[in-house]
Image (cartoon, coloured by chain):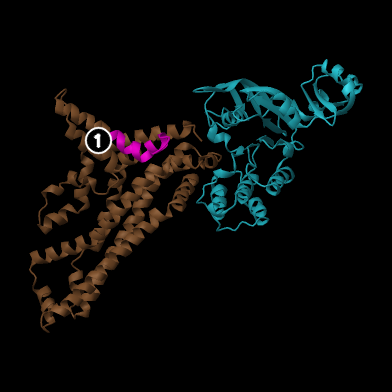
Chain colours: A brown, B cyan
Amino acid sequence: MKTVYWLIKREFWEHRGGFFWAPVITGGVFLLLNVMGIIGGEVFGMHHGFHFGDAGDLENLSKLAGSLDAHQMQMVSSALDMAMLSASFLISIVFCFVVFFYCLGALYDDRRDRSILFWKSLPISNTQTVASKVIAAIIAAPIIAIVCGVLTGFAMLLLFAITLSLHGVSVWSLLTLAHPFQVVAFLVGSLPIYMLWSLPTVGWLMLCSAWTRSKPFLWAVVIPVALGVILTWFHILGLFDVESNWYWREILARVLFSVFPGGWFKETGMGDIGHDPQAINAFFSLSNAYSVFAKPDIWIGAAAGIAMLALAVWFRRWRDDS
Amino acid sequence: MNAVITASGLSKRYKNAVALDNVSFDIQPGRIVGLIGPNGAGKTTALKALLGLTDFQGHLSVLGLDPRTQRDKLMEQVCFIADVAVLPRWIRVREAVDFVANVHPRFNRAKCEAFLARTKLTPDQRVRQMSKGMIVQLHLALVMAIDARILVLDEPTLGLDILYRKQFYQSLLEEYFDDNKTIIVTTHQVEEIEHILTDLMFIRDGRIVLDTDMEAVGERFAEVLVSADMAATARQLNPLDERQVFGKSIFLFDGIDHARLQALGEIRRPSVSDLFVATMKGTYA
């Protein structure tokens, strides 16, 4: 256990830039863009002579806030929640690129620079090594990304509140309409789904990483795509009745893109939500998210991912090219 | 005493070359064994087999363990330095010490830090900022602080200047080596380690062609400085090698009675490098 802990720490030392600085900087850039947007809006407003609270009647927005009916209140609250989630969304895009390339290099980079000979001179089993890298990819890195996303989201709400306060609009009452803790709970609660959901991609990338003698990216992408092209070709020829669409959607996408968070949203009915805030709220609830566990897809993917990881451990043990 | 390493019938074949060809040997504890051979002779393959880094045919027992199946356990008792380039370039001195201290049960942190204190390395320095000599100092500090029973060194001083090389072997000998430890070393700089070796193994084309201890080398082999008039007589004794120096011939004999050789001229103990060159004649031809 202690060894695995230090192995994870080791991963963090090596990939501090990707795991820590990438989400932090993304969050910072996101806030900066918002500040720029706000300032831009203010300047634009001054030049063109319209303001919040229109023509000196600063009370208007507050009044407006007070006069919202229940439905509009819900609209505002889900808009605020979405605004908070949007910070996490941007960070998660950066984060998944980090995880993708981390997995590709995890069992390859140290073979290329021969530092594997140093790691292998220590009493560490290959299972522990691979396990620590998987934990880093699907638990440690997402937690850092979630923390950054939540902090950025809070900072952004605060930013809007301060801006509006400068216009004499008390928005604190509006802000109470947001559900920051629900949003946080949703993000944190999604972690177990993410862990299981991303396993086929993590497994496949690490398998390529442990197996390939060079260019892991090429192999990891070329093999599934080539297979898909062949299947599609057979499909066009009508040689046998292969469902090539099914392959692209259920195999290729799962094997290459499952590190992108929220890949399971279509399973939980994202297509059905419209603009109804209630439906949006219901969609972004954990009980809805957990409905993905009731479908076989996630479990089959996870099992396949673990099988590929087991194979990666085997290659890690016997690949002899250093 | 029981051998720490027993190999019998060790074979390993790569796609187009035989790396090890039915090799058998024993290594006793408390020895410093030089495994010496030309490039591509199978030295590194033999070491990798000992360390469980490669598959092979035959029987091999290291400290009573099979390196193929019990590698994780074996590595608590065995250390190795492959060559100076294998420390990860991103790691800092502090991180390397922390890491090894926490994953290796036989690591003595105080010893490691004492050794590092005598170098110019600073805790925040990264490997990529170090010279080759400094990297090997760090690696040696880590390895010497591990109370292992076998230390395997594969060209540990490749590319280092003479100061670092001397310091490397001196540290090993003075502060690390004792009767319970065994060191196996391969190198091309034979002259520099000759005086610290207790055993000698020559390997050529995947076979062990000489396996002896250093005392026996002096008894078995002799270098004789023969004047020109005696050269014909000397040649009749089947010398391993003959070379000319200042009008005299130097012959290298294997297993000839020293009393007979004395009649030919002055007897010297051959250096390991001369022995090596004579034994490996024609390797690259």
- Is B72 above or below relative to B162? above
Residue found 21% across the figure and 43% down from its top: A292
Residue B54 percent across, percent down from the top left: 53, 29
- Compared to residue B28, the image places residue A121 above or below, namely below
What residue sits 32% from the left and 37% below the top?
Answer: A305
Type of amino acid under label 1: Ile
Query: Does the magenta run of residues contain A263?
Result: no
Where does residue B247 sit, x and y in percent of width and height? 85, 29
Tell me the quarter of the image containing the C terminus of chain B: top right
Residue A92: image quadrant is: bottom left
Tell me where residue A304 sits by quadrant: top left
Residue B237 falls left or right of residue B207: right
In the rendered image, which quarter is residue B8 located in?
Answer: top right
- Identity of the residue drawn at 20% across and 76% down: A42
> Does residue A159 lie above or below A94 as drawn?
below
> Residue A291: where, in percent of width, then height?
20, 45
Mark 1 falls within which chain? A
Is any part of residue B250 visible from this angle? yes
Q: Secondary structure at mark 1?
A: helix
Q: Is residue A4 left or right of residue A226?
A: right
In front of the other: B205 or B120? B205
SS assignment for the magenta stretch, majority: helix
Q: Is residue A220 magenta?
A: yes
The residue singled out by tag 1 in the image is A251
Task: Check the image and report above or below for B51 versus B86.
Answer: above
Image position of A295 (left or right of B183) = left
Question: In the picture provided, is B208 more to the left or to the right than A86?
Answer: right
Q: Where residue A159 sits in the image (x, y, percent)?
A: 26, 71
Q: Which residues are magenta?
A: A208-225
